Image: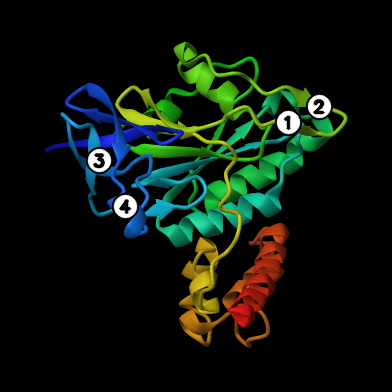
Amino acid sequence: MREGVIIKLVSGDYSVLSDNEIIVCKARGVFRHKEIAPRVGDRVLFDPNTRYILQVLPRKNELLRPPISNVDKVFLVFSVKFPDLNLHLLDRLLSIVEYKGIEPVIIFTKIDLLEENDKLEYQKVKEYYQKIGYRVYETSKFNEVNQEIINEINGSISVLAGQSGVGKSTLLNKIEPTFNLKTAEISYALGRGKHTTRYVELLRVAEGWIADTPGFGITDFEKMELSTFARTFIEFYYLSDKCRFGSKCLHIHEPSCKVKEALQQGLILPSRYENYLSFIEEIKELNRKY
């Protein structure tokens, strides 16, 4: 048996990288009975002669949509124009990725399309996410990809996520032109793009791997304790130590809540708190159903 990492999955064919060699394997039928499906990112044991995957080694994490395992970072790619910056979706994905225990990195694209009267508000938003601890990078049509983005990819398995049409494939093409990924056509009338990626594949970038995926589908919350969810808003989590009810404070109606005080003082981005309240209601409904 040999050990390798699944770097590509197309129609039941698993491309396994082992000792700098790519071997296309099939999964044994036993996986179906055990309800285990090998995924891109999995470390596996396989038979190089029969080319069958025999065992999936323990995962440190996993995503269902896209079906990928052992992810170190999720790059949340959001355009500031065409389509407009969607802070509701950004906060949703940040919360979900935090809950999964994966490190998020934010990339804002199409900076060159910002109109003069939008720049101040955008700068305020960018600086807020940096202030609460997230690394934020920018790209534009006229600039090469920041070397720091490539450094982020080194030594890790990363997922590129975001709405269709925000420039994910364009970003990957800039990082490594030999990828030759098809760039999405944008319908400016609709303000959204068309999906161009049809399968999940790990692409080699310098000393790391990055996946471009057919639509990032982990936009639904899981059933969880509300206090657990509250901790996924990292700035709320750090303030909760000073709340009267500590980590049990949900920052809604509780007295002596430091999060609400910070909001009133203008220290918390209003959209963050509004999105938090919206997500709380969504999780309450989810918990009632299940």
Residue lying at 75% horizontally and 39% vertically, measured from the top left = 120
Circle nearer the N terminus (3, 4): 4
Q: Residue furthest top?
A: 178
Residue on which the image places disc 1: 193
2 vs 4, front mark:
4
Query: Can residue 268 be seen in the rendering of this structure?
Result: yes
At 68% from the left and 58% from the top, the residue drawn is 269
Distance CA(mark 4)–CA(mark 1): 36 Å
Please tell me whether mark 4 or mark 1 is closer to you in this view.
4
Residue 185 falls in image quadrant:
top right
Q: Are marks 3 and 4 in contact (CB under 8 Å)?
A: yes
The residue to which callout 2 is attached is 187
Cα distance between the residues tagged 3 and 4: 9 Å
Q: Position of residue 172 (x, y in %)?
A: 51, 23
Which SS class for mark 4?
helix
Q: What residue is disc 3 on?
A: 53
Left or right of 43 in this view: 202: right
Q: Are circles 4 and 1 on residues that touch, CB within 8 Å? A: no
Q: Whole-Å distance between the Cαs marked 1 and 3? A: 37 Å
Residue 124 place in picture, x, y as percent = 68, 45
Disc sitting over residue 31 in the figure: 4
Q: Position of residue 46 (x, y in %)?
A: 19, 38
For the residues bearing labels 1 and 3, Cβ distance under 8 angstroms: no
The image shows residue 39, relative to residue 218, as above or below, that is above
Q: Secondary structure at mark 3?
A: strand
